[in-house]
């Protein structure tokens, strides 16, 4: 065990001390400090592209007890900038485990801290809102806070550019029934898996692809994926999204994709005080008067004020009454602000993909009748 002392220092000067595990680097790590309330799924959290640029603090106190597998991943690498836990297990117990979490962090050159009062961190963030933090061996507050100020804030960074594919690629499903174009803002592997499970062949496009490139592939449906950061940093692609919307092709937006659909049609977004991150977020389906327990990971939401007339709100978050789903009143478009591919219930929200396939089939049938 590595007992080197490491500090997490928040921008308000708060210091939380612990010991390093994983990758031991003297380099200072700066990122937005956020917490996740899920009791399991730490490997999926670590590899979720929506955590890019952030230092993650799980609220569950024991992390790593079932180890690391080769399958429970949502991208090709760990995405978080740092990992802060109360305790971690270096002797996991699970048939699928291939290494412990410290080895996994080391392999991906990610600094972790354990022995930290994570409850105190979460209470502070819930009261004051998310803050930039720095993982450092330095305890000179003034110098550390200067280092934080000299870095771009989380809100100023185009993190989607760091996680999106740079070249379009295909994932072909034999005997596929539907062709789906996915705009990759930070797509999770399980979204691809669940679409292929539904007999879809996929073409994954870079986030800044032109509408012409996407529409020329003649997809049956289009998915705007989740991803990290402030949607306001993607203003330059809203014109292309609006052209895709006007094409009449069925569209599903998830999380960041949901926000971008809303923004392309005139809505505004805002930053939540401490975000929605965890597997216990209650969402109400307004039409069916049904509540789902959902997994979420986002720090921004769509404003209800001056909501576009061509959209209607379909789901709300029962914790704070924010918009969790919408649909277009005349076009085959709907979107959600939670993870349809995640398993909090365990699979309550996968029906979203079935609804998307039905929407494609209905649209194709309507077009054939004309």
Image: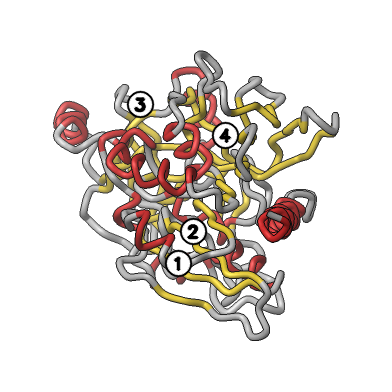
Q: Residue at x 45, y 39 (%)?
A: 260
Badge 4 marks a residue whose secondary structure is: strand
Foreground label between 4 and 1? 1
Q: Earlier in the sequence, mark 3 or mark 4?
A: 3
Position of the N terminus, as image quadrant, is: bottom left
Q: Earlier in the sequence, mark 4 or mark 1?
A: 1
Q: How many marks?
A: 4
CA distance for labels 4 and 1:
27 Å
Q: Label 2: which residue?
A: 187
Q: Label 1: which residue?
A: 204
CA distance for labels 3 and 2:
34 Å
- Circles 1 and 2: CB atoms closer than 8 Å: yes
Q: Which mark is residue 276?
A: 4
Q: Is residue 128 visible?
A: yes
Q: Is residue 343 visible?
A: no
User: In the rendering, at what x and y percent does residue 13 appear?
Assistant: 30, 24
Badge 1 marks a residue whose secondary structure is: strand
Q: Earlier in the sequence, mark 3 or mark 2?
A: 3
Position of the C terminus, as image quadrant, is: bottom right
User: In the rendering, at what x and y percent does residue 149 appear?
Assistant: 18, 30
Q: Say if 111 sits above or below 34 in the image.
A: below
- Circles 3 and 2: CB atoms closer than 8 Å: no
Q: Label 3: which residue?
A: 14
Badge 2 marks a residue whose secondary structure is: loop
CA distance for labels 4 and 2:
18 Å
User: In the rendering, at what x and y percent does residue 191 appear?
Assistant: 59, 61
Image side of residue 5 versus residue 104, left or right: left
Image side of residue 72 versus residue 359, left or right: left
Quadrant of residue 45 in the image? bottom right
């Amino acid at each position: 065990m590595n007992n080197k002392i490491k500090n997490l220092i928040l921008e308000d000067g708060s210091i939380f001390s612990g010991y390093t595990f994983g990758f031991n680097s003297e380099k200072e790590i700066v990122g937005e400090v956020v917490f996740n309330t899920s009791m399991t799924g730490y490997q999926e959290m670590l590899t979720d592209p929506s955590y890019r640029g952030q230092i993650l603090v799980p609220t569950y106190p024991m992390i790593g007890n079932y180890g690391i597998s080769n399958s429970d991943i949502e991208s090709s690498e760990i995405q978080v900038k740092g990992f802060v836990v109360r305790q971690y297990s270096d002797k996991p117990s699970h048939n699928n485990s291939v290494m412990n979490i410290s080895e996994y962090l080391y392999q991906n050159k990610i600094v972790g801290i354990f022995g930290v009062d994570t409850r105190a961190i979460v209470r502070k963030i819930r009261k004051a809102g998310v803050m930039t933090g720095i993982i450092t061996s330095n305890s000179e507050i003034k110098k550390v806070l200067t280092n934080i100020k000299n870095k771009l804030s989380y809100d100023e960074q185009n993190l989607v550019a760091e996680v999106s594919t740079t070249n379009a690629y295909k994932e072909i499903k034999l005997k596929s029934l539907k062709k789906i174009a996915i705009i990759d803002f930070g797509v999770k592997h399980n979204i691809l898996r669940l679409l292929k499970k539904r007999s879809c062949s996929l073409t994954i496009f870079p986030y800044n692809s032109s509408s012409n490139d996407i529409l020329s592939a003649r997809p049956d449906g289009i998915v705007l994926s989740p991803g990290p950061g402030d949607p306001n940093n993607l203003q330059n692609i809203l014109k292309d999204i609006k052209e895709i919307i006007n094409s009449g092709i069925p569209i599903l937006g998830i999380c960041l994709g949901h926000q971008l659909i809303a923004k392309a049609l005139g809505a505004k977004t805002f930053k939540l005080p401490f975000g929605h991150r965890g597997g216990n977020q209650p969402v109400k389906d307004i039409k069916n008067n049904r509540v789902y327990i959902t997994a979420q990971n986002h720090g921004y939401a769509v404003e209800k004020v001056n909501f576009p007339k061509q959209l209607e709100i379909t789901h709300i978050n029962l914790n704070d009454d924010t918009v969790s789903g919408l649909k277009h009143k005349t076009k085959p478009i709907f979107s959600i602000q939670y993870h349809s591919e995640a398993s909090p219930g365990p699979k309550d929200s996968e029906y979203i993909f079935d609804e998307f396939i039905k929407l494609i089939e209905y649209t194709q049938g309507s077009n054939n009748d004309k």
